[in-house]
Amino acid sequence: MRRAWGTVDTQWPVTLTEGQIVLRPLHRRDESAWHRIRTMNRAWLTPWDATLPPGGGAGPASFREMVRALDRQGREGRMLPWAVCWASSPLRIELAGQVTVSGLVGGSASMGSIGYWIDERFAGKGIIPTAVAMAADYCFDVVGIHRIEIAIRPENAKSLRVVEKLGFREEGMRPRYLHINGDWRDHRVFALNADEIPGGLLARCRRSDELDPGTHRG
């Protein structure tokens, strides 16, 4: 597939595993579980969900169209759109959320941005910090980009704890930066460069778990 200038080689599709956490492509067979989770978690997720501004065009008309669009952008080197799954046993692997590296570019920028959400039932297990670390390490070590950033609304205390745990460096406020829950919202921006974590972000996440007895696994 021909790539646009400035994109990177993601080798999509990609599956990553760390303990009970699996990052894999979203599949068409996930449709029922995905809709059920999103419906159950409407109040939990809506305040932080990205929305399209007036005149911003239409999003995917169906779940299957969304999956096709995500896979296409993955193959084009524009993003890494992972489903986050939790393996409570070898025979029970549940869809728990998503983590997406978007805006991937090479060249002199050599960067990407990470966004994520999780089913409230799985919150508190350390899944999202680990998934973000897995995604970042893949981007740094395999894709070869230089910088990862995460933009978070100032009110989103749970998401702010993710970047705090992983040691992301805060770079300041971007006023009215992203269209979230129906309006342009201010965001705090956090970032890491590859040379700031020579041992990898996942190793840092593991050390943090060892120091934090409140992180629940299993």
Image (cartoon, rainbow, N blue to C red):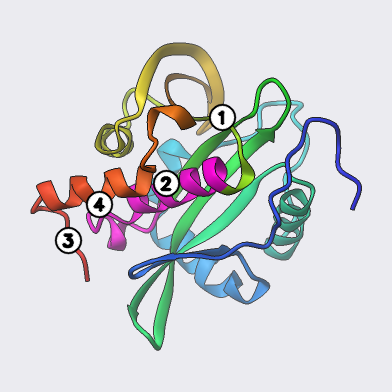
Residue at numbered disc 4? 206
Q: In this picture, is 207 found above or below 197?
A: below
Q: Quadrant of residue 92?
A: bottom left
- Depth check, mark 3 against mark 1: the one in front is 1
- Depth check, mark 3 against mark 4: the one in front is 4
Q: Are marks 2 and 1 in contact (CB under 8 Å)?
A: no
Q: In this picture, is 145 found above or below 173?
A: below
Residue at numbered disc 3? 216
Residue at numbered disc 2? 132
Q: Where residue 53 appears, x then y in whole percent?
A: 66, 27
Q: How many marks?
A: 4
In the rendered image, residue 133 lying in the magenta stretch gets the answer yes
Callout 1 secondary element:
loop
Q: Are marks 4 and 1 in contact (CB under 8 Å)?
A: no
- Mark earlier in primary sequence (3, 2): 2
- Depth check, mark 4 against mark 2: the one in front is 4
Q: As rendered, which of 145 and 66 lies closer to the eye? A: 145
Q: Amino acid at mark 1?
A: His
- Mark earlier in primary sequence (4, 1): 1
From which residue to which does the magenta span run? 118-141
Q: In this picture, is 186 found above or below 141?
A: above
Dominant SS of magenta comes to helix
Q: Residue furthest bottom?
A: 91
Q: As rendered, which of 205 and 89 lies closer to the eye? A: 205
Mark 3–mark 1 distance (CA, rounded to whole Å): 32 Å
Residue at numbered disc 1? 146
- Mark earlier in primary sequence (3, 4): 4
In the rendered image, residue 58 lying in the magenta stretch gets the answer no
